[in-house]
Amino acid sequence: MHRFWTPVIQPIIEKVQPVDIVEIGSDAGGNTRNILAWCEKAGAVLHAIDPVPKFDVEALAERYGEQFNFYQALSLNVIPLLDRFDLVLIDGDHNWYTVFNELKLLLVNSI
């Protein structure tokens, strides 16, 4: 998803000005780093979810402190634990069952 940072994601984030961002699927952390850099400037928090991250989670946690909450787990197990979110980026498991149920959980948690 990091390819879409400049043309799509960053303009949306800057327009919406979210305080709590959820990223489902961090993969190698390219987009995660972009979001965290934005969070640092804006005072926002990123909640990133990935069961098998391909980047140094501890290094980012050390660098960004309380602005970075990482969950090494399945999104369907984590979403119910989130208290609030203003923006959710979904790029995790791309099968119908998972995405459908992520959206259902996000809807329930947003009410």
Image: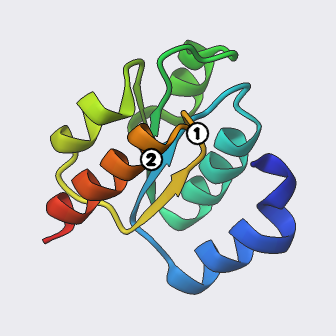
Q: Which residue is mark 2?
A: 99
Q: CA distance from mark 1 to mark 2?
A: 6 Å
Q: Residue at x 64, y 78 (%)?
A: 12
Give left or right: position of 2 versus 76. Answer: right
Residue 106, relative to residue 49: is it above or below? Answer: below
Mark 1, other Cα within 10 Å: few <14 / some 14–19 / many ≥20:
few
Residue 104, relative to residue 101: is it above or below? Answer: below
Q: Residue at x 23, y 59 (%)?
A: 84
Residue 32, image x, y percentages: 64, 41
Q: Which one is nearer the viewer's eye here, 14 or 65?
A: 14
Q: Which one is nearer the viewer's eye here, 13 or 89?
A: 89
Q: In which image quadrant can residue 39 be found?
A: bottom right
Q: Which residue is mark 1?
A: 94
Residue 108, image x, y percentages: 15, 61
Q: Pick out the residue farthest to the front.
A: 96
Secondary structure of residue under mark 2: helix
